């Protein structure tokens, strides 16, 4: 089993490490910078005997080497710098994702694409269009991360275990992400029974600001431990065909009343990629927030289309 990771930066290399060390697959690590992928591949290979796995990490700058991959993850791009919003990344990252999707189509026509590069929903849309793959085989990583961040903060507030919390974060990967409070349970109880609405609002605000908070603290670069862990959970669900429901960016064709857009929704993941979009019932407030979120993505996607047609 082989998986390719495009971009051997912080997210890509940490993801490669998680895949190899959990004995999921061999990893082709592709980067435009030869030294980065070969140096990191050597370092990860040197760790294999200590960790006791026999997975290979294969560095390359040549897209031909991704041939035969079951999944290709696109992490290549520029991370968000302090003060830079996700939309400003659009111009820089769209050419990289376009190049990656074109090469995946050429060398791995049967692969499943997971997009990590920001602005996430627009980049997932671009990969979907450029590859021409069916909608079940192109998905984006954001909702898993946002859900995990919200879960971690709620667990901290209530001093409960993470596994005691069930929640979904949908919509765009950005300031307009939508927490589904009406579907959030703590030890099986509605969250509103155990946290005041003010406290819930405060935790939602902290979740929305978490990425920027980390960027501000790191000064250079952005989060990568949680993003790589989130991407790993998607890779694992697909490779092991677990049918686990995770919040991921999907191309919608009528679900949630939306068409021709990639946006975060809960979906069952298995060997075919997105096996089913879970159409949850939203409250009026959640539906309105989701609509706002979709509008933000549409604006970015329209900008993207303009850029691509030039
Ligand atoms: N082809 C292949 N790799 C590329 C290309 C390209 N055209 N352009 C840039 N890269 C590589 C860089 O050389 C770098 O090694 O992508 C890598 C990005 O790594 P980091 O800068 O460390 O970024 P990272 O923190 O891993 O974030 C990856 O996730 O959060 C999103 O939008 C963010 O694009 C970022 C992505």
Image: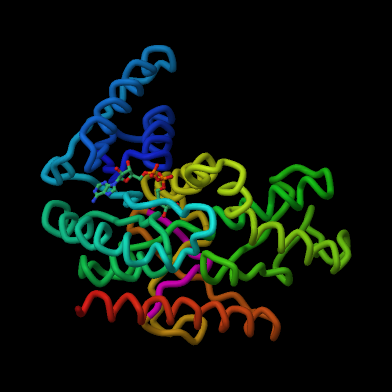
Q: Position of residue 189 (x, y in %)?
A: 82, 60
Screen quadrant of the C terminus: bottom left
Which residue sits at x=71%, y=63%? 205
Does 105 sit left or right of 118 as displayed? left
Residues 214 and 158: in front is 214
Magenta stretch, residue numbers: 261-270
Q: Is residue 269 magenta?
A: yes
Screen quadrant of the N terminus: top left
Which residue sits at x=63%, y=53%? 210
Which residue sits at x=23%, y=38%? 33
State the image quarter where residue 285 is shown: bottom right
Does 83 sit left or right of 181 as displayed? left
Q: Is residue 200 visible?
A: yes
Q: Is residue 1 visible?
A: no
Q: Position of residue 171 (x, y in %)?
A: 54, 71
Which residue sits at x=38%, y=56%? 117
* Chief secondary structure of the magenta portion: strand
Residues 10 and 103: in front is 10
Q: Position of residue 139 (x, y in %)?
A: 38, 62
Q: Position of residue 300 (x, y in %)?
A: 41, 76
Q: Is residue 282 magenta?
A: no
């Amino acid at each position: 089993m082989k998986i390719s990771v495009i971009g051997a930066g912080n997210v890509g290399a940490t993801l490669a490490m998680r895949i190899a060390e959990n004995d999921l697959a061999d990893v082709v690590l592709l980067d435009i910078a030869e030294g980065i992928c070969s140096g990191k591949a050597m370092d990860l290979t040197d760790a294999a005997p200590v960790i006791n796995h026999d997975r290979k990490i294969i560095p390359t700058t040549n897209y031909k080497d991704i041939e035969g991959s079951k999944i290709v993850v696109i992490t290549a791009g520029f991370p968000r710098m302090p003060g830079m919003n996700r939309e400003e990344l659009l111009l820089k990252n769209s050419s990289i994702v376009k190049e990656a999707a074109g090469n995946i189509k050429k060398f791995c026509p049967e692969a499943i694409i997971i997009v990590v590069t920001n602005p996430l929903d627009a980049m997932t849309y671009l990969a979907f269009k450029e590859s021409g793959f069916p909608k079940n085989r192109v998905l984006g990583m954001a909702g898993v991360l946002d859900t995990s961040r919200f879960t971690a903060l709620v667990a901290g507030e209530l001093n409960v275990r993470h596994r005691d919390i069930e929640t979904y974060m949908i919509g765009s990967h950005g300031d307009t992400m939508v927490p589904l409070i009406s579907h959030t349970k703590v030890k099986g109880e509605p969250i509103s029974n155990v946290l005041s609405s003010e406290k819930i609002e405060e935790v939602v605000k902290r979740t929305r600001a978490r990425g920027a908070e980390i960027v501000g603290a790191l000064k250079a670069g952005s989060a990568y431990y949680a993003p790589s862990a989130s991407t790993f959970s998607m890779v694992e669900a697909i490779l092991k065909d677990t049918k686990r429901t995770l919040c991921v960016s999907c191309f919608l064709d009528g679900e949630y009343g939306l068409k021709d857009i990639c946006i975060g929704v809960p979906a069952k993941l298995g060997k075919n990629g997105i096996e089913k979009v879970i159409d949850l019932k939203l409250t009026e407030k959640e539906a309105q927030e989701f609509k706002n979120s979709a509008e933000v993505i549409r604006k970015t996607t329209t900008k993207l289309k303009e850029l691509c047609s030039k």
